[in-house]
């Protein structure tokens, strides 16, 4: 069963990801695809960020403060210093510190 | 700096997220009682974090293959959108490498390629391949490391936040490039609506709302650089 699942999932995964490349370029030059590329892809990055945060509770201690602090640190650091590894480290450090002091 | 090194350097954020997550996947796989060596094969040929975790639960519960496909396919919708946005960049590449690049277009590959340096076509082809390869490798190696670990590893909360931080930093870079704030508002509103109307499947519903909103909005005129 697990081997069948492996083969099935590998096929599903590949087919889904390759499907957009089967379109002809006439299609993808259409406005609708331009719109999706320009607006929806940045949206997705933000949705992936917020998706990670959806389970936090704002009503119970620590009131989502570690996440908010960590996120602010990441955004500020990335905007100013443009170093993604540094921003991630600062964000995690900030998150851990706030959690340590509040938790 | 050689292209291999440059791709490696730019892929470090993915290393920090995918390697530990791979370890967790490997240990969970082994703990479910499946043959451990299949875990890296899953990571190599399926290469889909959330879907792989979900499949473990479903296979352990003896679900049918059809149920498995129907359960994991919706999570692949975002990969289609990544594919659409990378279409123009990938279409000049040969079919074989285009197939690999399409397969390897996961969250991290997409975000890192969006912010990556600009090359001429031949260099860009190699850079895309190398970056995808590095990210794929971290996921496989992490899974390998996971099946060597004897006890179940849970992700320390700090590491879980690393993934959030990675996506947040990618969003900042995206905004720096486009200076278009509308996707931010769409995403936040879509997220809030989805949380309200469908708390069980927030991500899918918010992607659907964002999809509709992106189509409804007019295109922003291209910025003169």
Image: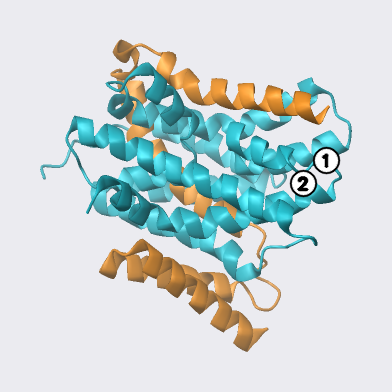
Pointer 2 indicates a residue of which chain? Answer: B
Q: Is residue B167 visible?
A: no
Residue A72: image location, x then y, percent: 43, 71
Pointer 1 indicates a residue of which chain? Answer: B
Name which quarter of the figure residue B140 lies in: top right
The residue located at (36%, 22%) in the rendering is A32
**Helix, strand or loop at disc 2?**
helix
Q: Is residue A82 above or below residue A59?
A: above
Task: Say which residue label 1 marks.
Answer: B34
Q: Label 1: few (<14), some or many (≥20) within 10 Å?
A: some
Left or right of A99, for residue B66: right
Question: The chain drawn orange is chain what?
Answer: A
Task: Say which residue label 2 marks.
Answer: B29
The residue located at (33%, 43%) in the rendering is B114
Residue B13: image location, x then y, percent: 43, 58
The residue located at (77%, 27%) in the rendering is A3
The residue located at (69%, 23%) in the rendering is A7
Q: Compare residues B22 and A79 and report the one nearer the observer.
A: B22
Question: The chain drawn cyan is chain what?
Answer: B
Left or right of A96, for residue B25: right
């Amino acid at each position: 069963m697990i081997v069948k699942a492996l083969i099935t999932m590998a096929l599903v995964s590949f087919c889904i990801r390759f499907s957009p490349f089967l379109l002809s370029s006439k299609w993808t030059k259409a406005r609708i695809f331009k719109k999706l590329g320009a607006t929806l892809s940045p949206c997705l990055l933000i949705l992936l960020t917020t998706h990670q945060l959806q389970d936090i509770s704002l009503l119970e201690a620590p009131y989502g403060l570690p996440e908010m602090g960590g996120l602010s640190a990441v955004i500020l650091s990335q905007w100013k210093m443009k170093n993604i590894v540094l921003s991630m480290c600062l964000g995690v450090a900030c998150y851990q510190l706030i959690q340590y002091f509040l938790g | 700096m050689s292209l291999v090194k440059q791709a490696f350097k730019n892929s470090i954020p993915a290393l920090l997220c995918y390697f530990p997550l791979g370890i967790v996947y490997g240990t969970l796989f082994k703990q479910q009682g499946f043959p451990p060596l299949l875990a890296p094969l899953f990571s190599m040929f399926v290469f889909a974090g959330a879907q792989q975790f979900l499949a473990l639960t479903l296979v352990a519960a003896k679900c049918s293959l059809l149920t498995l496909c129907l359960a994991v396919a919706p999570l692949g919708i975002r990969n289609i959108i990544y594919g659409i946005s990378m279409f123009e960049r990938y279409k000049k590449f040969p079919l074989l490498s285009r197939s690999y690049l399409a397969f390897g277009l996961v969250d991290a590959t997409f975000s890192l390629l969006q912010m990556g340096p600009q090359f001429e076509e031949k260099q860009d082809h190699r850079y895309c391949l190398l970056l995808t390869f590095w990210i794929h490798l971290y996921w496989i190696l992490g899974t390998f490391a996971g099946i060597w670990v004897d006890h179940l590893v849970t992700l320390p909360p700090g590491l879980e936040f690393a993934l959030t931080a990675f996506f947040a930093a990618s969003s900042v870079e995206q905004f720096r490039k486009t200076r278009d704030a509308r996707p931010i508002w769409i995403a936040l509103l879509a997220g809030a609506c989805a949380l309200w109307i469908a708390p069980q499947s927030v991500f899918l519903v918010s992607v659907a709302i964002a999809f509709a909103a992106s189509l409804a909005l007019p295109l922003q005129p291209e910025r003169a650089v």
